[in-house]
Amino acid sequence: MDNRHFIARRAAQYFKNGDVVNLGIGIPSLCGDYAPEGVLFQTENGLIGVGPTAEGMMKTERFYNAGGVPFIPVPGASVLDVALSFGVIRSGRMAATVLGGLQVSETGDLANWAVPKRAFGMGGAMDLCTGARTVIVAMELTAKNGTPKIVDCCTLPLTGKNCVDHIVTECCVIDITPQGLLLKEIRAGYSPEDIQSRIEPYLHIDPDLKTMTE
Amino acid sequence: MNNPKIKRREEIISCFHDGQTIVIGGQAGANLPYRLIECIVDSGAKDLTICSIDSGELDRGIGRLIHAGAVAKMITTHIGTNPETAALLAEGKIEIEFNPMGSYIERLRCGGTGLGGVLTKTGLGTEVESRREIIRCNGEDYLLEPALRGDIAITRARRADPLGNLAYRGTGTASHPIAAMAADLSIVECDHFCDLGEISPDEVRVPGMFIDMILI
């Protein structure tokens, strides 16, 4: 299993039967493959109950997700216009959202919609991280060049303040707590010192630290 | 063709002029009003302000207008699917106002339904806050998102009848019913043109009174 799927599978363990969940693009979009039964996926362009990717003659322009991928709705799916779709998100009915991240701060600030000299826009991410009951960031621990993505203070434009609950990476799970960052799980082959050396803020270690399932 | 709302393509093309603000329904590369977008391209109108959820793809969908150099400003939520928009932004050749998607659609809904704006927590503590007024209501802080409205709205419906009653299907609904109400002149293209009574009253998402022109 590659790192992207490894991260997605762990992030999906936060979902419970009966949850309505929204997945961002990139790694988060892979979580659907690993979700427990009974979880309904929302696409913010207006449907609750996104099913498998549609191929061949099952493709129709009437069922596309917000990432532009055609899908088959599950039995019990419901259609909403975009205004109501975001009403669902803002009103606290969304159990969880999984988003990608460029930077996450010690206090749970998230930056994921612009880099210097290149803004791609926040899309629905600001509403999701403000409204969803649980905000999970699924990302690699550092940027490709090794620069920390978990930082003391975000330098990129924020998507939301104090909004992130869990960070899932290819080598650890970190919770944002009022006391700071808490290392909850670590992948076999890594030490807490390895993780600490690749992030900026101080990392507390859960006395009940677990090993991530391979 | 005695129906006053059904228009020939040439009549619709003549509605578009330089400097207009145009609201476009649809999202994510599917079910856009492609034929009406071609009408704008063929009108040759320039310096347009386009309000839409995204900027389409390279030379496709709303990207057709970007590629034609017809757009001076976009009020949108992301441009991640169209590298040409990003390049124009980097060169300073297009102005982009990014809105959170939930706030964008509420601004249009206000514009179409006689409201001045809405209060939302989305964007608090971000750079969106710097362009908005903070309002305290029921003991909590919100951003005031002002109403947004266009000169013209172009949208697409699954079905339309001679009165302009509109019905949708699946994620083809998207922002279309909201966008269709948020302009002085609302033009719709439909996949199926129905007889009066064929769309049952319960299926109508946008009453015909909101619609001025139909391209069938």
Image (spheres, rainbow, N blue to C red):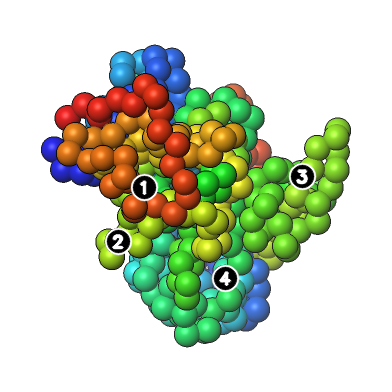
SS type, badge 1 = helix
Residue topped by disc 4: B96
Which disc is residue A77 wearing?
none
| In the foreground, A201 or B166 | A201
How far apart are the alpha carbons under marks 3 and 4? 23 Å
Residue topped by disc 2: A146
Quick one: label 2, few (<14), some, or many (20+) residues within 10 Å? few
* Residue at 57 percent of width and 35 percent of height: A179
Residue topped by disc 3: B142
Viewer can see residue B209? no
| In the foreground, A44 or B175 | A44
Going by the numbered disc 1, the residue's amino acid type is Gln
Q: Are marks 1 and 2 on the same chain?
A: yes
* Residue at 84 percent of width and 47 percent of height: B135
- Where residue A117 appears, as percent x and y from the top left, is 47, 75
Q: Are marks 3 and 4 on the same chain?
A: yes
Going by the numbered disc 4, the residue's amino acid type is Ile
How far apart are the alpha carbons under marks 1 and 4? 39 Å
Going by the numbered disc 3, the residue's amino acid type is Tyr
Looking at the image, tell me whether mark 3 or mark 4 is earlier in sequence order.
4
How far apart are the alpha carbons under marks 2 and 3? 38 Å
Looking at the image, residue A206 sits to the left or right of residue A9; the answer is right
Quick one: label 3, few (<14), some, or many (20+) residues within 10 Å? many
* Residue at 44 percent of width and 54 percent of height: A200
